[in-house]
């Protein structure tokens, strides 16, 4: 269970109602928030999750998965 307070919209994203790519991104953001000790998130209108630094097959898989799941 996370200690990060989420809006209803954030919860919908985390539950997958806005597609798998958004859900994956929200899981990453939520985990990073937890690691940093954040207690809430702020609303934004655009973001870039960087997977373009090739450090092995995992980074390529990450980018390909987001694209396959509808991320643009």
Image (cartoon, grey):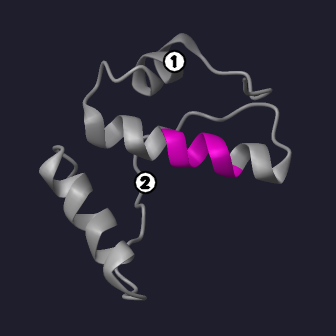
The quadrant of the rendering that contains the C terminus is bottom left
Picture layout, residue 24 above or below residue 14: below
User: Which label belongs to residue 11?
Assistant: 1
Comes first in the chain, label 1 or label 2? 1
Q: Residue pushed farthest front?
A: 57
Q: Position of residue 8 (x, y in %)?
A: 53, 11
- Classify residue 13 as left or right of residue 29: left
Specify the principal SS of the magenta part: helix
Per the image, the residue denoted by label 2 is 47
Residue 32 image offset from top left, x and y in percent: 67, 52
Residue occupying image coordinates x 41% and y 25%: 13
The answer to whether residue 28 is magenta is: yes
Q: Nearer the viewer, residue 49 or 42?
A: 49
- Secondary structure of the residue carrying tag 2 is loop
- Taking the view exactly as shown, the residue that stands out farthest to the right is 37
In the rendered image, which quarter is residue 42 located in? top right
Q: Bounds of the magenta span? A: 27-32
The CA distance from mark 1 to mark 2 is 18 Å
The part of the image, by quadrant, that contains residue 40 is top right
Q: How many marks?
A: 2
Instruction: Report whether 1 appears left or right of 60.
Output: right
Query: For numbered disc 1, what is the local secondary structure?
Result: helix
Q: Nearer the viewer, mark 1 or mark 2?
A: 1
Task: State the image coordinates of residue 20 (x, y, percent, origin top left).
Answer: 27, 35
Could you tell me which quadrant the N terminus lies in?
Answer: top right
Above/below status of 60 relative to 8 = below
Q: Which residue is at 18% across, 44% downward?
A: 69
């Amino acid at each position: 269970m996370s200690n990060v307070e989420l809006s209803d919209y954030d919860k919908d994203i985390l539950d997958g109602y806005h597609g798998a790519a958004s859900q994956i991104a929200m899981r990453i953001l939520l985990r990073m928030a937890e690691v940093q000790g954040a207690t809430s998130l702020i609303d934004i209108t655009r973001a870039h999750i960087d997977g373009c630094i090739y450090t092995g097959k995992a980074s390529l898989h990450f980018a390909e998965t987001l694209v396959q799941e509808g991320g643009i």
